[in-house]
Image (tube, rainbow, N blue to C red):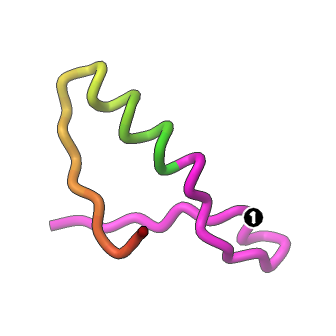
Amino acid sequence: MQGIELVVDETAGDRTPNTAAADQLMEETKKRGLLLGRGGMK
């Protein structure tokens, strides 16, 4: 099991979850035939 955290800008100290990036990641991987699970985000 692997986990990644997509945040707005960690280098600037903004660790707000980047839901737009997560949505884009889910869609792009689905197009390529890779299904990912999403946990911990609403």
Q: Which residues are magenta?
A: 1-21
Quadrant, the N terminus: bottom left
Question: Eyeballing the image, is 21 above or below 32?
Answer: below
The furthest residue to the front: 42
- Local packing at callout 1 (Cα closer than 10 Å; few below 14, some 14-19, many 20+) is few
Horizontal relation, residue 34 to residue 42: left or right: left
Please check the rendered image and state whether residue 36 is part of the magenta-colored stretch, yes or no: no
Measured as percent of width and height from the top left, residue 9 is found at 75, 64
Nearest to the observer: residue 4 or residue 37 = 37
Horizontal relation, residue 17 to residue 10: left or right: left
Residue at 47%, 67% (x, y): give it: 5
Q: What secondary structure is found at the residue carrying circle 1?
A: strand
Q: Which residue is mark 1?
A: 9
Residue at 22%, 47% (x, y): give it: 36
Please check the rendered image and state whether residue 7 is part of the magenta-colored stretch, yes or no: yes
Residue at 18%, 39% (x, y): give it: 35
The furthest residue to the top: 31
Amino acid identity at mark 1: Asp
Q: Quadrant of residue 12?
A: bottom right
Horizontal relation, residue 12 to residue 8: left or right: right
Q: Quadrant of residue 33?
A: top left
